[in-house]
Amino acid sequence: MKILAVLLIFSFTMFASDYAVITSSKNSIDRLSSKQLKDIFMMKLHYIDDVKVIPINASASASIRQIFEKNVLKIDRQRLNNYWIKQHFQGISPPVTQSSAQSVKMFIKNVNGTIGYIPAEMVDSDVRVLYEF
């Protein structure tokens, strides 16, 4: 019996996500698909239902951003930079950037419609998880 419990705990932690895409707990958005997330962070999707969404990125040098780009956006940094150069000439700017995970979380708690990503251990009742990676 003890072995079974240990195996269950091990398998749960082995498959638990390290990062979470979040929004304010006051926001009505419940869950997002990886396609919706990619479209939001590439500034192609601006509304979910009637909620205007505002993506918030971690700083370009943050490891969480590199993981997000690889696992959620599925694009490498060079292609992403090229994408934003092209978008710039169409008058489209990349998402707002915050300097730390704490800043991302605080921004999301205080600005309606914002969506960002933080380490999963920072999730609390002030935010709602929309996607895990």
Image: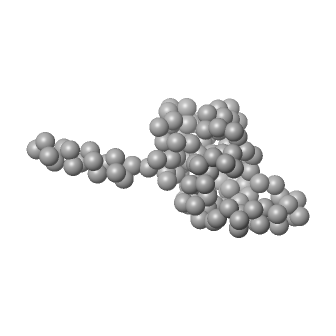
Tell which of 133 and 77 is nearer to you: 77
Residue drawn at x 74%, y 58% is 43
Q: Is residue 59 left or right of residue 63?
A: right
Q: In this orientation, does residue 61 appear?
A: yes
Q: Is 91 displayed left or right of 54 in the figure?
A: right
> With respect to residue 120, does 84 lie above or below?
below
Rendering coords of residue 75 (x, y %): 63, 65
Q: Position of residue 50 (x, y in %)?
A: 68, 50
Residue 109 visible somewhere in the drawing: no
| Above or below, 91 relative to 18 | below
- Look at 87% across and 64% down and name the residue there: 90
Residue 55, image x and y in percent?
69, 49
- Tell me which corner region of the image, top left, top right, bottom left or bottom right, holds residue 23: top right
> Count the marks: how many?
0
Residue lying furthest left: 1
What is the basis of the colouring in this image? one colour
Which of the image's four quarters has the N terminus? top left
At horizontal 55% and vertical 36% (from top left) the residue drawn is 127
Nearer to me, 93 or 32: 93
Of 100 and 124, nearer the camera is 100
Please provide percent x and percent y for residue 103: 66, 34
Q: Residue furthest front?
A: 61
- Which residue shows up at 44% across the image and 49% down it? 17
